[in-house]
Amino acid sequence: MSGKPRLTYLNGRGRMESIRWLLAAAGVEAEVYLETKEQYDKLIKDGFLLFQQVPLVEIDGMKMVQTRAIMSYIAGKYNLYGKDLKERAMIDMYVEGISDLMQMILVFPFSPPDAKEKNLESIKERATNRYFPVFEKVLKQHGQDFLVGNKFSWADVQLMEAILAVEEKIPAVLSGFPQLQVFKTKMSNMPTIKKFLQPGSPRKPPPDAHYVETVLKMFK
Amino acid sequence: MAGKPKLHYTKGRGKMESIRWLLAAAGVEFEEEFIETKEDLEKLRSDGVLLFQQVPMVEIDGMRMVQTRAILSYIAAKYNLYGKDLKERAWIDMYVEGTTDLMGMIMYLPFQPADTKEKNLALIIERATARYFPVYEKALKDHGQDYLVGNKLSWADVHLLEAILMVEECKADVLSAFPQLQAFKGRISNIPTIKKFLQPGSQRKPPTDEKFVAVVRKIFNI
């Protein structure tokens, strides 16, 4: 019964990727990959999935589901959630905003071909007009390395993940955001993130056609 | 310097309703400023008070909080409705995420095309009775306590009652196969702060009708 969590999901990013990022600090015991609908149906039949859905993270004797619940628990457990209620409130607000942006990226591979260009434009618009300006301003105003409380938190991990995910689609997206460029470099050099960004880590590649096909078959 | 929390939203349920429920359950008086036109929303945006240009926004304890979950988590923790430790919080979070998914389906129903309404309504009932309600029914049956987590009223209980009442508005007898939930509904509805919120004249908002859908569409340009 090692202390490390066990992850059950498809062999791809989806809703588990943010959890893998957050666990980069703690390490992961193992990942169980769902490849067929039969595997998934068996998990449901065996009563492992509270609401019949994945992600599933087995951690500290609990079979946790629901991405946000899992991440809140991990953030709390590994001291990535601020020092008091107000810092937690700021972290939650930032994380929720970034989550909305990540949601657009999550569903993008599943949009019909004729909507893809429009959706990509929307991602670019939201990132550059709604979300990135907020974090650029926060970092500029307090001049600290981290978003909240001058200490590494869940919000920094989530923002780093989002920056890289948007850059995969829009390489020059940070061109108007000097603070975020500096932030990105600093985060890349945090030891646990640096390790997570190296080949061989639990980090998953961007979704490809095979991944999309697996998802559609598994979750109908 | 603790004024009452001030809620900025439309005069309907939407994403703010769960926040109204939680504040009411906690016995916290709050004020509301209603967005009635597109211009009202534009003004909030140009005043720079909406972090991500969106509502709900709640002025509370010197903060202008946005993002529904962030607001609800803050209120729950502040008013001791979030369990006694990290593990209880984890259970409350899991339960609340489930009821959020269910209520999310109901929230969007009035905005969907007329020809899909029947199908979507059937899906809501299916999810409620096959996916969500059985979980809470079992949790209550297994521990035999009055509340979902830690033998104490929490955010999870308030959220579940809200969800039950919303689904009942879609199908009145939806709890017929869930005796634990029927008892739960009775118990939680009788908690004085919640009982008060359920009475006419409270700040609880009515279900969204077609007329209100048109207002919302205009305000948010959707």
Image (spheres, rainbow, N blue to C red):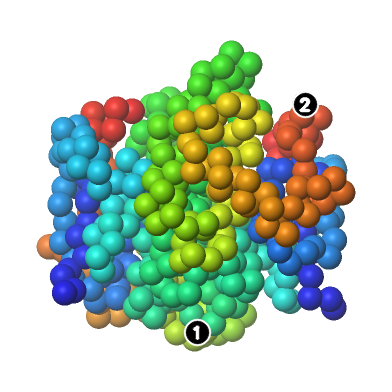
Number of numbered discs overlaid on the protein picture: 2
Q: Identify the image quadrant of residue A36.
A: top right
Name the residue rendered at 72%, 76% in the picture.
A60
Query: B56 or A128, which is in the foreground?
Result: A128
Tell me, for residue B84, which label it has, or none.
Answer: 1
Give the labeled residue for mark 2: A209
**As drawn, B80 above or below B99:** below
Q: Amino acid at mark 1?
A: Lys
- Which quadrant of the figure contains the N terminus of chain B? bottom left
From the top left corner, tell me how far across and down residue B133 is, in percent: 53, 62
Is A131 placed left or right of B45 in the picture?
A: right
**As drawn, B41 above or below A21:** above
Q: Amino acid at mark 2?
A: Ala
Name the residue rendered at 60%, 78% in the picture.
B87
10 Å neighbourhood of mark 2: few (<14), some, or many (≥20)? few
Task: Please check whether the numbered discs 2 and 1 fall on a single chain.
Answer: no
Which chain does the numbered disc 1 sit on? B
